[in-house]
Image (tube, grey):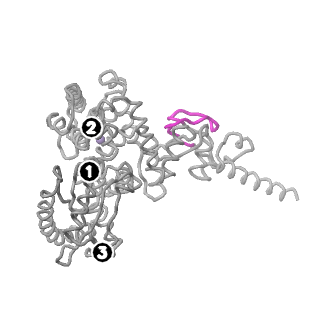
Amino acid sequence: MDPKEIIDRLRQITTEEAALIRRAFAFATAAHKGQKRLSGEPYLIHPFHTALYLAEIQADSQTVAAGLLHDTIEDTTTTAEQLEREFGAEIAFLVEGVTKLGRLKYRGGVRHAESLRKLFLAMAEDIRVIMIRLADRLHNVRTLQHLPPEKQKRIALETLEIYAPLANRLGIWRLKGMLEDASFPYVYPNEYKQVVALRKTKGKETIKRLEKIYRALEQALATRQIKNYQIDYRVKYLYSLYVKLLRKEMNIDDIYDISALRVVVETTDECYQVLGIIHGLWRPIPGRLKDYIAIPKPNGYQSIHTSIFTGDGCAVEIQIRTARMQHEAEFGIASHFVYDETAKGRPDRNQTTNRSNWIKELVDWQKNFKTDEKFVGRLTDRLTQEKIFVFTPKGEVVELPIDASPLDFAYAIHSDIGDRAAGAKINQKMSSLGAKLRDDDVVEIIVNKNNHPTAKWLELTKTATAKHHIRNFLAKQQEKIKEKNS
Ligand code: MN
């Protein structure tokens, strides 16, 4: 392992930034000294790969350094204060954020999955924390073979349900595809084999066909005015092919974009020019032309897609986009660190060193997500601090209004636990049922089967759920007394 490998992947990097990454590497090496992964390899291999993936998606150098350090607080004697002294407040903040997110666990269930995804976004405060977490997870899911089968399945499922959709939401498609393909065989082993076989037979044919079109197109572009173009082809990720197959009743012949040719040019004008050239050479399939440049997808994706008849009874999808669009499609939010839109795509990394600038970017970015109102709503909630998130001792998340009490928490878990609540521990310290909870508190409810709600409990609670159950109990009690007296 050599920090140079990480540094080499970053396209623009100053000497100071490279030095920072070397220092972080040295620090992580010392901190994890003697620790081993289940594979028997030195533990350092894990933060090293995490940082490599982050460098690959062109994250900023602070994020890459934090990737190297991401397990030091959790797994070594290193403290946040120490990181702050050595690397500054920003990197300490990122590592602490990753550590905090590590406590969240997925316990299955669709409802939980959705709230957990939102919580991740809300809790991270800084999207870079999630990027580190995604890179961390990618390495873990790619090394699952060393874990016992039940654990493999749990982690892979969690990756499919929580992490991949997050990568998708952030527009980091490359990470999304890699996370899904690494998890796929553990969650759906039979379907995985089926899709691999399908892609293998079908893939060979299509690649031959793509090469033919590639050559013809290259010739056509060379004779026109288009100078700087790049053509390549990509084969669809396995899991996303599977999802599409499910919609098409597993009929692979109905899928046009199992592989696609991609033409990358410099300007938007050239995109439309290339589209004209393609439609002049091959007959387009009616209804398959999509102009995501004029009308970007809600998550910001831009490209022109068209499918053409290849002349031998088959069809191929061609995607046309600019270099900037291509970069954004692969790296999503991460790409905003590299490309400054106002400067015509000129790289500007200084922007990233300023946290307030970054937050401004995040806010701008959120504006582009107007269609996903719930998501934006939740983030805004968090910013205005109307909600708090607390944990069960097992790391499950409970969302409560600000100033909620352990009693609210108890009723949020289950009405029986609420009705029998006798006391509470907040962060392992005994406290009253009416105490005010704060963000990130770990709450444990002590139950006593002889305990029951009293009228005073109404004053100790904030949530409608809790008040409803308390009133219910009191009403029933009243009835019982009446019955006795009559
Ligand atoms: Mn880790």
Q: Does residue 394 appear in this view? A: no
Numbered disc 2: secondary structure: strand
Q: As drawn, is 95 to the left or to the right of 364?
A: left
Q: Residue at x 52, y 47 (%)?
A: 377
Q: Earlier in the sequence, mark 3 or mark 2?
A: 3
Q: Is residue 435 magenta?
A: yes
Ligand 1 is located in which of the four quadrants? top left
Image x and y of residue 46, in percent: 23, 41
User: Looking at the image, is 148 positioned above or below residue 351?
Assistant: below
Distance between mark 3 and mark 2 Cα atoms:
44 Å
**Residue position marked by numbered label 1 in the rendering:** 322
Residue 63 horizontal/vertical position (percent): 30, 35
Q: Quadrant of the N terminus?
A: top left
Marked residue nearer the N-terminal end (1 or 2): 1
Q: Look at discs 3 and 2 and give the one toward the viewer.
A: 2
Residue, disc 3 = 250
Mark 2 nearby-residue class (10 Å; few <14, some 14–19, many ≥20): few
Q: Is residue 220 magenta?
A: no
Secondary structure beneath dot 3 equals: loop
In the image: residue 147, left or right of residue 358: left
Q: Position of residue 140 (x, y in %)?
A: 27, 48
Q: Is mark 3 within 8 Å of ligand 1?
A: no
Q: Amino acid at mark 1?
A: Thr
Residue numbers of the magenta segment? 426-445
Q: Is residue 240 depicted above or below 21 in this figure?
A: below
- Is the magenta region chiefly helix, strand or loop? loop
Q: Is mark 1 within 8 Å of ligand 1?
A: no
Q: Is residue 309 visible?
A: yes
* Badge number at residue 310: none
